[in-house]
Amino acid sequence: MDPIRLAEVTSTQDVARGLPVGSVVVADHQTAGRGRLGRRWEAPAGSALLASFVQPRRPLASLAAGVAAARACGERVRLKWPNDLLLEGRKLGGILVEVHGDTCVVGIGINLSWAPPGAAALGADRDRLLEGLRRELQRWFAAPAETVLAAWRERSDTLGRRVRVELPGGALEGMAEDVAGDGSLIVAGTRVAAGEVIHLRADGTPALSGS
């Protein structure tokens, strides 16, 4: 199935919603791209890979998508829980998974030739990366849950370091110890299902990640 290629769109997620499994939507520019927590994703036209992939619904979809994207981007790319791609500690891209019926629409944005201040750019060929993402997503959305968890732990830049998690009721600070079987992050013995994670330096100040 050939990708649907658009010059400009509000969001590739909007176009991909309702399409069959295996569909891919890629755009040169998004006028209303979005990330987690209602944030906007903005990039100059043609400077990033902006794509949505329709995958079968599965548990741990966000972690499977993260592993797939990191592997497609190369060995240097790491994962920040729950959905950020990091290159040398700086934000390279993000992933948004939206569930619609029996499908997951996986939106992926990766900086290629431009990045905001403090962020990173991959400098890769967009079409080659797109094909790599398709292959890796197909593989990892079919992988057993334990295989996904093990691969995510191996790529994680979050586990084993001190973090602060911004939660609706306040902040939780401590060591990021592991991911649970449901994909939750375990921080100082507490399971965190959702929240904004900030990586901390040894002195307790936020580590630069461009996020």
Image (cartoon, rainbow, N blue to C red):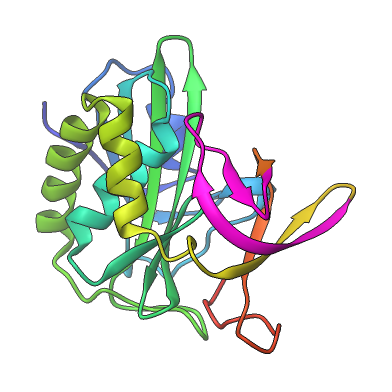
In the image, is residue 49 part of the stretch drawn in magenta?
no
Quarter of the figure with the N terminus:
top left
Residue depicted at x 40% and y 40%: 63
95 lies above or below 117: above
119 lies above or below 197: below
Asked where in the image residue 144 lies, by quadrant, the reply is: top left
Asked where in the image residue 75 lies, by quadrant, the reply is: bottom left
Closest to the observer, 191 or 80: 191
Asked where in the image residue 115 lies, by quadrant, the reply is: bottom left
Residue 6 visible at all: no
151 lies above or below 129: above
With 14 as the anchor, is 77 left or right in this view?
A: left
Residue depicted at x 18% and y 31%: 138
In the image, is residue 187 part of the stretch drawn in magenta?
yes
Residue 198 visible at all: yes
With 50 as the anchor, is 181 left or right in this view?
A: right
Quarter of the figure with the C terminus:
bottom right
Across and down, in percent, residue 109 comes to 39, 55
The magenta region covers: 170-190
